[in-house]
Image (cartoon, rainbow, N blue to C red):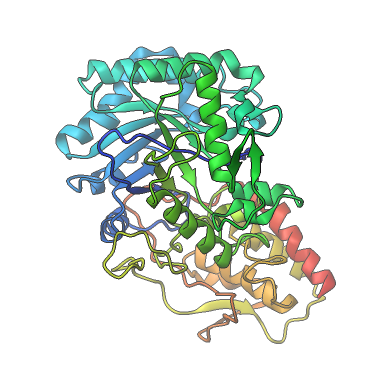
Amino acid sequence: MRLYHAAIGLVSLLSMVSGAMTIGANWGTQATHPLDPAIVVRLLRENGIQKVKLFDADYDTLKALGKTGIEVMVGIPNDMLATLATSMKAAEKWVSKNVSAHVTSNNVNIRYVAVGNEPFLQTYNGSFLRTTFPALQNVQSALIKAGLGNSVKVTVPLNADVYESSSGLPSDGDFRADIHDLMLAIVKFLNDATAPFTVNIYPFISLYSDDSFPVDYAFFDGNANPVNDGGTSYYNMFDANYDTLVHALQKNGFGNLPIIVGEIGWPTDGDRNANIEYAQRFNQGFMSHISSGKGTPLRPNADINAYLFSLIDEDAKSVDPGNFERHWGVFTFDGMPKYAFNLGTTNTGALIPARRVSYLERKWCVMRPSAKLDDPQVPLSVSYACGLADCTRLGYGTSCGSLDARGNISYAFNSYFQIQNQLDDACKFPNLSTITKTDPSTGTCKFEVMIEPYYGGAVQAPGHAKKALVLVGGLILFFLKIV
């Protein structure tokens, strides 16, 4: 879904509806076994989450959100931008099918259309530079034609790499030189349309990509050495990044443009810095920070409209950015809270788990006790399993990092077995595997039992299998050599 800008911090918004701070959540569905949308919507409502950001406009998802009052941002994937940019008719058809129909027939509270997702990432090598703005214009025109121009606003979720600071200080913030004119055109368009600027920022990525990054500066405890910017002190990356963006907007004549934090969060696995402790520290700190109403130095007392990334883990996401990419959820794949997290929206101050989740039988596929580690079929079988399943919890500093070689192999086998809905043939690695009804979980490493597949919508198979095979299968082969 994204690679990231590693340099700055985060964002805010003057709410279109009211001054009250409400937290939203990103609801992604790149999972082999996504939850039934009705279960997820109940999860949102019971946890008091009043805003949701989607990455597409799936019919079943939007239908489930009908008559709930939950504020919705629907998404247009990057691969649709070219079509919408070159055809007004296509834009009108998309709006009619994915916005108008749900607003009028299903009473879905759609408030935003996200045109693309981080389309100007430098890693995309300019693939969407010529199509994003025309698509944005056409979708806006289609909304106006449909009579929705005042109630539904367009926006483009952008990565923080669209702006930069030559000195590293917020006061020198400006839009990236190679897209400066394009960014000004988009910002002016958003301003004229009374639409918000949406940005995604991840302090975790700074820590992940830079060993010298000061850990405490990523959090909100006030323990970091402050960054002094002409007499203004910044104690966390959030405030610094937010004000870098505001300086960029001010410098170009749009200092009052509303800003939405499209994505912010912390993963819980897949890297030594992706863990429950840090995720709880970051997300709870963020909630306390925005709940205080203090805003940031450049926009004091501003309400912050933000969407946590993310609601639920997605085990079929690309691992190109890193193995942590499948572990951003506040809830596990089956809707269980990962840690104590007070959103300020429930009577108990605790997250409420998903209800009425159906699981497959409690059985697991593990390495046969009689199997030998030096069997030549082991590396081939492990690579095959991980290439088609999810082994991102294996590695140094991860939740399953303490497993021995046999444990790693069993985890790989079980992941494949569960994703294949526990088919008998999915646990027939040659003379290596067996099915057990004894839970092999140990310590922090949980061997999952998969939920029953949801067939109401398109269940996505794990993408990027070859890349996962190289990244994760190679990791396990490394384990086999050293354990």
Viewer-closest of 371 and 272: 272
Q: Is residue 328 above or below residue 362?
A: above
Q: Quadrant of the N terminus?
A: top right
On the image, the x and y values in percent for residue 403 come to: 69, 76
Q: Is residue 170 visible?
A: yes
Q: Is 168 on the left or on the right of 264, as rendered?
A: right
On the image, the x and y values in percent for residue 402 come to: 70, 76
The quadrant holding residue 194 is top left
Q: Residue furthest front?
A: 231
Q: Quadrant of the C terminus?
A: bottom right
Q: Is 41 on the left or on the right of 87, as rendered?
A: left
On the image, the x and y values in percent for residue 48 come to: 28, 56
Q: Is 239 on the left or on the right of 407, as rendered?
A: left
Query: For the point 46% across and 23% down, which residue is it?
Result: 255
Q: Is residue 91 above or below residue 78?
A: above
Query: For the point 42% across and 77% down, which residue is it?
Result: 361
